[in-house]
Every structure is written in structure tokens, then in C-alpha cells.
Image (cartoon, grey):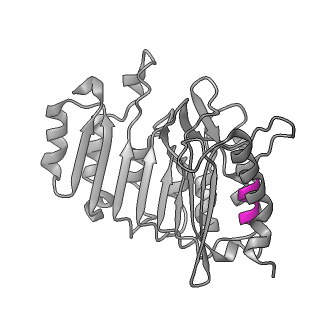
Amino acid sequence: METLSNLFAPLQAVINKKNQEHGFEANHPWYHRLTLVEANGLLNVEYQGEYELWFNKRATVNILQDLFQLLTHPDVAPRLRSLTYLTEATLAANGTYDYNIDPLVDGKQPFPNLIRLSLAQGHGEDGYKILTSPQSGDDWYEAGVLARLLDKAPFLKELVTPVPPNVNFFHGCQHPLQLLDVDAGFDCMDFIRNLSACLRFPNLQKLVFTDFRQYYLDDWQKQTTSLEDYILFFKSPVASRLKSITLREVNLTSNEVNQILNIRSEGVEITCCQASR
């Protein structure tokens, strides 16, 4: 079995080279950092930086993909306890910072001890962060990769994602997920409606959902989650089991919010989008 220091040394070296070449100090927002913390034989990984590292006189390094592939190594995957990805999204193109996690689920290696996966979401310095997949072709969707992740990580308890999962995520054998934090990204994907009818997560205790808020689009309001879907969710058995529900940037009036709170207000926090305030 190779030591973790040996396995991760090439990635650490290229990250250090990037920081040195551009003079990034540790407190600089563009500083790249890979942190590995071992505890009780398990590994917590956090990467802060871009998905690619550009150099003046050497080839670009696909650092994020290389990291994900390394995490599937047979000496690493069984020990992975948590994975966190953070980024300022400075490599965004046309206001969009898209990345994928397909290397994590493409192989045969499972993650039997992975309990937390947190993926960068929301606005970055130069763009909006979304999760895509090569399997979606030219479309900006995750193409079921989050559903496949549940199969690879049967004991995952916390998931933070920059986009809603597709319909496959809500079907399958029961899963012990306890926390679900979802950003609508560029498409709500009927997330709230799908979750309302989901029987897969009996241990789900906390939901955080940030609604569609691409205000620059002429029809952005038509793409937000409807009042009807929110009411359907709050009347569902799924919502009744949750200890905490946080809804952000919802496109609802104060009267509509009150309709929801009349169904349930305990443990509920609702923030309306700017256009609705």
C-alpha cells in the first residue's frame, strides 16, 4: 500500500508551482490549496482552486480531474471520509463556471466510508458555478452523476451540490442521506416536486434549496419553483420528517410565503428573491 503522501505528492507539487509562479500568498483569494487530514484511519480532503492550472511555460494541468481520479485509487477510496471543493470561479467563460465529477463515479471503486460531499455552488468571482457531465453532450446538466454517486457512496450523509439532481436520484433503494443542500443553477429540474414524492431518504433531516435566480433572462420568473410545488412539498410526508427547511431566493410574494408558513413554520426559513421583496 502506497502512503498518502506519496500518492498526493505530484498534485501538491504542481499546486505549489502554480502558487509560486503567480506569487499567490496563502491569504490571496486565488491561492490554490489541497488539504489532507487523516483521522482514525480515514481521510478528509479539501481542494480550493480552479479546475485547471495554467502555466506560462508548461502544459495546462487538469487538476480537478486528476484529483478525482486519484481519489478512486484502491488505497484512497476506501478511506475517503469527506470531500470538499471550493473555488472563486475565476476561469468562468461567459459567466459560467462548469465542472464535472464524473471521474469519481466512472470506475468500479466504491466509497464505503464517504459521509460528506460538498461541491462549490452559487456565484463566483467571474461566473456562476454549475455541475455538468460529458454524458449530457452539449447540454449543461449533470446527467445522473449524482444518482450514480449515491450508489458509489451507500453511507453518504451530507450532499451539497450546485445543481439539482435528475430524476434518477429520487428512485432506488433507501439511502441514509441526512442533509441535502441544492442550488437550482440554470434549471430547477422540478427538484421540489420530485423530492415531494421521494421515498428514498427516510433519514433526511435538513433541506437547503436555493431557487432559480438568473435575473438577466427575460423569462426568469417562469423558470422558478411555483407556489403549487412548494405547497405540495410542505404537505408531503418528506417535509413532515424534516427538522429544518431553508428556502432561499424564492420567487414568491409575502402572502404566498404566509400560505406556506401556515402549513408549517417550525424549523422553516424562507428568503425571497430581490424581485419579490
Q: Residue at the bottom extreme? A: 40
Residue nearest the viewer, comparing 187 with 128: 128
Please tell me which residue is depicted at 65% across the width and 71% down the height of the picture: 111
| Number of disc labels | 0
Image quarter of the N terminus: bottom right
Q: Is residue 111 above or below residue 252?
A: below
Q: Is residue 115 above or below residue 227?
A: below
Dominant secondary structure (helix, strand or loop) of the stretch shown in magenta: helix
Q: Position of residue 135 (x, y in %)?
A: 72, 43
> What's the magenta region?
66-72
Residue nearest the viewer, comparing 44 with 31: 31
Please tell me which residue is depicted at 32% across the width and 41% down the height of the picture: 248
Residue nearest the viewer, comparing 22 with 118: 22
Kindly indicate the quadrant of the structure image that contains residue 151: bottom right
| Residue 71 counted in the magenta span | yes
Please tell me which residue is depicted at 71% across the width and 65% down the height of the picture: 71
From where the camera sits, is residue 57 visible?
Answer: yes
